[in-house]
Image (spheres, coloured by chain):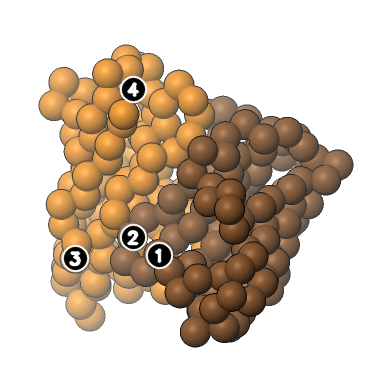
Chain colours: A brown, B orange
Amino acid sequence: EAGVAQSPRYKIIEKRQSVAFWCNPISGHATLYWYQQILGQGPKLLIQFQNNGVVDDSQLPKDRFSAERLKGVDSTLKIQPAKLEDSAVYLCASQAGRLNEQFFGPGTRLTVL
Amino acid sequence: AQTVTQSQPEMSVQEAETVTLSCTYDTSESDYYLFWYKQPPSRQMILVIRQEAYKQQNATENRFSVNFQKAAKSFSLKISDSQLGDAAMYFCAYEGSNYQLIWGAGTKLIIKP
């Protein structure tokens, strides 16, 4: 089966610019996660979707980050405006259900200058 | 709140030898799941092994096994017959009642040829 797809793989922007990331989960996986992974740290959950509804976005900086999952499939994560501290790898993961593993995409490495 | 601690930022082992990575966690829940994920350099996060807390038997997947000590809240990963391809960041993760993963900071495993 095809894995989780993410694009772009790399993005370099200047602070205060906007950026968007795209994720296509494994077909049939109802749950989708966006994580932020800063270099040298474990992933930090930003938002969790169940189908097209938000389950948890308590750690999403809503003044600058937004995410949507239209039709319960693909998802986009946007940052506007970006700050230097947003430099990180943004991981998307999907899961069929509890007790099932989370499958991760390759991530998008964001550098904010 | 649950926490996961990996006290070894970096470990090294000679090829073909055995290495153990440590993980401790804190929780008040009795039903939960524990995971070890592997993240090779510039590659995707993949699941290595999982353990259900209600199971007393330690999980094993080929050369990978865990030592799960529920009372001590310890969940170590043993890699036998280490191979060059085992070099990666290893993350311990906890999944509790909210179905979300709480991650440790990771241990970088270096394999010496």
For label 1, the crowd category at 10 Å Cα-Cα, with few meaning under 14, some 14 to 19 and many 20 or more, is some
Quick check: can you spot residue B98? yes
Q: Going by the image, does A37 lie left or right of B90? A: right
In the picture, the quarter occupied by the N terminus of chain B is top left
Q: Report how far apart the C-alphas of labels 1 and 3 lie in the structure.
A: 17 Å
The x, y position of residue A37, in whole percent, is 44, 60
- The three-letter amino acid code for the residue at tag 1 is Ile
Which residue shows up at 49% across the image and 84% down it? A113
Give the vertical position of A55 relative to B37 (above or below).
above
Residue at the spot 19% in from the left edge and 34% down from the top edge? B74
Q: Which mark is residue B84?
A: none
How much space separates mark 4 and mark 3, taking CA atoms?
27 Å
Q: Are marks 1 and 4 on the same chain?
A: no
Could you tell me how far apart the alpha carbons at marks 2 and 4 are, in whole angstroms? Answer: 25 Å
Contact check, label 2 and label 1, Cβ < 8 Å? yes
Residue corresponding to mark 4 = B53
- Measure the alpha-carbon separation of dots 2 and 1: 6 Å
The residue indicated by pointer 3 is B10
User: SS for tag 4?
Assistant: loop
Q: In the rendered structure, are the residues bearing label 1 and label 4 in contact, judged by CB atoms less than 8 Å apart?
A: no
Discs 2 and 1 share one subunit: yes
Which residue is pictured at 36% across the width and 45% down the height? Answer: B103
Q: Secondary structure at mark 3?
A: strand
Rendered-image quadrant of the C terminus of chain B: bottom left
